Amino acid sequence: MQRILSRTRLRAGQEAAYADAHAAIPPALVERLRAAGVANWSIWRDGQDLVHLIEVEDYRAMRRSLAGDPVNAAWQDVINPLLEADDDYSGNDDGIPLVWTLEGQA
């Protein structure tokens, strides 16, 4: 299982809309995320900055799977206008690089 940290940024004034959208995401999206290997996805907000912790079998495979998925595309149509930069799931990123963990040192 991979733990991936990523970051997005909210457009000013979209905090409430973003929180409302995530109060309960569509059940069909939950199904697609689970089918793509996502065990958990947590989001924290610090001002306009959003930090995502994604626990997934294979992050790149998950993104490839969701890139052309119509359920995910519909969700991105809701979320992307709230963000400073769209995510079309086309990249080959690996999230934010891990520098250190206590468990890795022990």
Image (cartoon, rainbow, N blue to C red):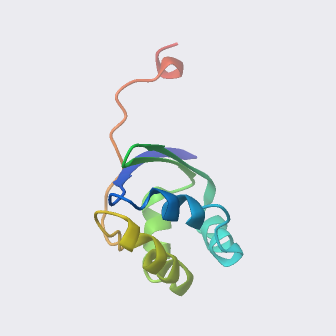
Quarter location, residue 57: bottom right
In x, y percent, where is residue 81? Answer: 37, 73
Examine the rendering and report whether any part of residue 16 can be seen. Answer: yes
Examine the rendering and report whether any part of residue 89 can be seen. Answer: no
Q: Residue at x 31, y 62 (%)?
A: 92
Q: 2 or 95, which is in the foreground?
A: 95
Quarter location, residue 51: top left
In x, y percent, where is residue 31? Answer: 68, 72
On screen, residue 13 versus residue 18, left or right, reads left
Q: 7 or 39, which is in the foreground?
A: 7
Circle count: 0
Q: 1 or 30, which is in the foreground?
A: 30
In x, y percent, where is residue 11? Answer: 33, 60
In x, y percent, where is residue 83? Answer: 35, 64
Q: 15 or 3, which is in the foreground?
A: 15
Q: Residue at x 60, y 67 (%)?
A: 33
Is residue 82 positioned above or below 95 on the image?
below
On screen, residue 60 versus residue 106, left or right, reads left
Q: Residue at x 48, y 22 (%)?
A: 104
Q: Residue at x 37, y 47 (%)?
A: 49
Q: Which residue in the rendered view is the most extreme toward the top?
A: 106
Is residue 18 positioned above or below 90 on the image?
above
On screen, residue 87 versus residue 55, left or right, reads left
Q: Which residue in the rendered view is the most extreme toward the front?
A: 13
Q: Which residue in the rendered view is the most extreme toward the bottom?
A: 70
